[in-house]
């Protein structure tokens, strides 16, 4: 390198982050990441660090792309007492998540109209500690309105979410085949993606008898909750969606898969080259039904956490590439809605809080089973970015992408103290659990937003709008 080249390099670079374990698309290696104007200028050899440029030495800590969590319920506006943009994005930053995508519910209004999206963008303004994208919603009120769907896409949503069973909130009703077909034809025409809560009502209705005659003691039984949401509901839902994909060519993503019974259907769909992807969640990979005590409603979610054998089969499906990604489905609520005093599984709100803990929870299980750091980055960074259509800016450490980085220690272990969580409510089933992987620093577009418990006081997160990726 000539002296002229060196001067030019120094002039162009704002920061260099280097470490012995940098997770790149080509593998884990020693490297220096040269950052300019919030983006990665280049990934250079470890030794290529000119003097005069600010340098952060990660040492032997892992430098990974910032996590992209494509399944988060922020709940603002309308239910901000459940979570909110400020608290959710602080928790994200503390957990190494640099981009999250907000679900269209449980906010009021739900993000099912262009006006509702504008309301949500206004609510997010100036509050976000990480970058935030938005899913729109498909409900009976807009499923047959191509103009509304196209308009939401034009205004910046990254795709759409639908429920096949009641969502739990009145403002986001479920859709059936009649509503799905025209919506999927329109989404295929527009090149968008449909995310689906894939449980069908039939098997759930057939299992409702498990609650008949249940008294207070029986309502506390986790096994009853588990039996009330049978795996058949997910299998039949997948079959419905595969048929509609075959008919419409709409790209579909199945959220929060909990049962391996769907996998034979998925393999058949993949053999047909149907455009279907699948996610699972940290709680399905961490917990199992055999370990959940009666009355422990902090563990309630839908679909439910299933047995130990099912958990291991999900890990095997990740290894085989059948499950594409891991996202949290962070779905918090005020503690009183979890029925903690009575432990009533039928009445409790179903949702797991884990946004800040996802990297550590998944890494702890992956580490035990011999998975690599590159596997983790593929599941939690690159694949969610592809799903959301933001992979030209997020999800990898490569030239031209945003300089979103998380620096963490994979062999450090911490016992989860709820008091350290940045979620609005600290209730989580991970309380008291020892997890490997301690986050030290989170960098968003070249600027440190979290550093060993301290946050950048000025929130710099931006709304990510499809096709524009700009501040709204």
Image (cartoon, rainbow, N blue to C red):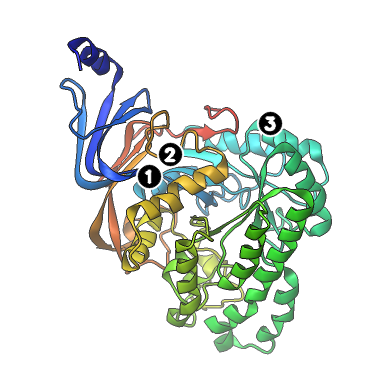
Q: Which residue is mark 3?
A: 154
Quadrant the N terminus occupies: top left
Q: Quadrant of residue 212?
A: bottom right
Residue drawn at the location 33% of the way across and 57% of the way down: 372
Residue 95: % across, % down = 36, 50
Q: Earlier in the sequence, mark 1 or mark 3?
A: 1
Q: Which residue is mark 1?
A: 93
Give the alpha-carbon distance from disc 1 to disc 2, as whole Å.
6 Å
Which of labels 1 and 3 is toward the front?
A: 3
Q: Which residue is mark 2?
A: 130
Residue 238: % across, % down = 68, 64
Helix, strand or loop under label 2 = loop
Tell me the number on the disc at residue 364: none
Position of 362 with respect to 193 (left or right) is left
Q: Is residue 142 visible?
A: no
The one nearer the camera, 417 or 1, is: 1
Q: Is residue 286 visible?
A: yes
Q: Residue furthest top?
A: 4
The one nearer the camera, 430 or 84, is: 430
Residue drawn at the location 61% of the way across and 64% of the way down: 267
Give the alpha-carbon distance from disc 2 to disc 3, as whole Å.
23 Å
């Amino acid at each position: 390198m000539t002296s002229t080249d060196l001067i030019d390099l120094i002039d162009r670079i704002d920061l260099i982050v280097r470490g012995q374990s940098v997770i790149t698309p080509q593998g884990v290696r020693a490297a220096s990441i040269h950052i300019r104007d919030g983006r990665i200028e280049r990934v250079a050899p470890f030794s290529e660090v000119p003097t005069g440029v600010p340098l952060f030495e990660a040492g032997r800590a892992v430098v990974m792309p910032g996590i992209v969590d494509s399944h988060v319920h922020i709940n603002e506006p309308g239910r901000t007492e459940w979570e909110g943009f400020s608290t959710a994005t602080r928790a994200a930053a503390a957990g190494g998540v640099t981009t999250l995508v907000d679900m269209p519910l449980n906010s009021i209004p739900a993000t099912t109209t262009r006006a509702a999206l504008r309301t949500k963008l206004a609510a997010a303004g100036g509050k976000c500690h990480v970058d935030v994208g938005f899913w729109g919603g498909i409900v009976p009120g807009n499923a047959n309105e191509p103009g509304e769907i196209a308009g939401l896409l034009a205004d910046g949503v990254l795709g759409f979410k639908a429920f096949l069973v009641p969502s739990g909130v009145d403002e986001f009703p479920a859709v059936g085949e009649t509503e799905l077909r025209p919506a999927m034809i329109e989404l295929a025409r527009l090149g968008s993606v449909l995310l689906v809560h894939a449980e069908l009502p039939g098997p759930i209705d057939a299992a409702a008898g498990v609650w008949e005659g249940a008294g207070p003691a029986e309502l506390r039984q986790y096994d009853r909750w588990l039996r009330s949401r049978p795996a058949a509901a997910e299998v039949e839902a997948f079959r419905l969606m595969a048929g509609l994909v075959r008919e419409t060519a709409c790209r579909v993503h199945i959220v929060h898969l909990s049962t391996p019974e769907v996998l034979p259907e998925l393999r058949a769909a993949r053999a047909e080259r149907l455009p279907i992807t699948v996610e699972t969640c940290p709680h399905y990979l961490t917990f199992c039904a055999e370990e959940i005590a009666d009355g422990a409603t902090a563990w309630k979610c839908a679909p439910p956490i299933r047995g130990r054998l099912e958990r291991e089969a999900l890990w095997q499906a990740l290894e085989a590439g059948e499950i594409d990604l891991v996202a949290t489905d962070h779905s918090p609520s005020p503690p009183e809605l979890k029925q903690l005093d009575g432990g009533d599984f039928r009445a409790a709100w179903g949702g797991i809080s884990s946004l800040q803990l996802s990297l550590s929870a998944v890494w702890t299980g992956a580490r035990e089973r011999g998975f690599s750091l590159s596997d983790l980055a593929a599941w939690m960074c690159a694949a969610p970015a592809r799903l959301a259509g933001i992979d030209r800016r997020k999800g990898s450490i490569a030239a031209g992408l945003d300089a979103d980085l998380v620096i963490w220690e994979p062999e450090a272990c911490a016992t989860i103290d709820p008091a350290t969580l940045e979620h609005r409510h600290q209730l989580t089933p991970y309380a008291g659990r020892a997890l490997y992987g301690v986050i030290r620093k989170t960098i968003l577009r070249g600027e440190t937003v979290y550093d060993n418990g301290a946050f950048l006081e000025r929130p710099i997160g931006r709304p990510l709008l499809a096709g524009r990726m700009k501040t709204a």
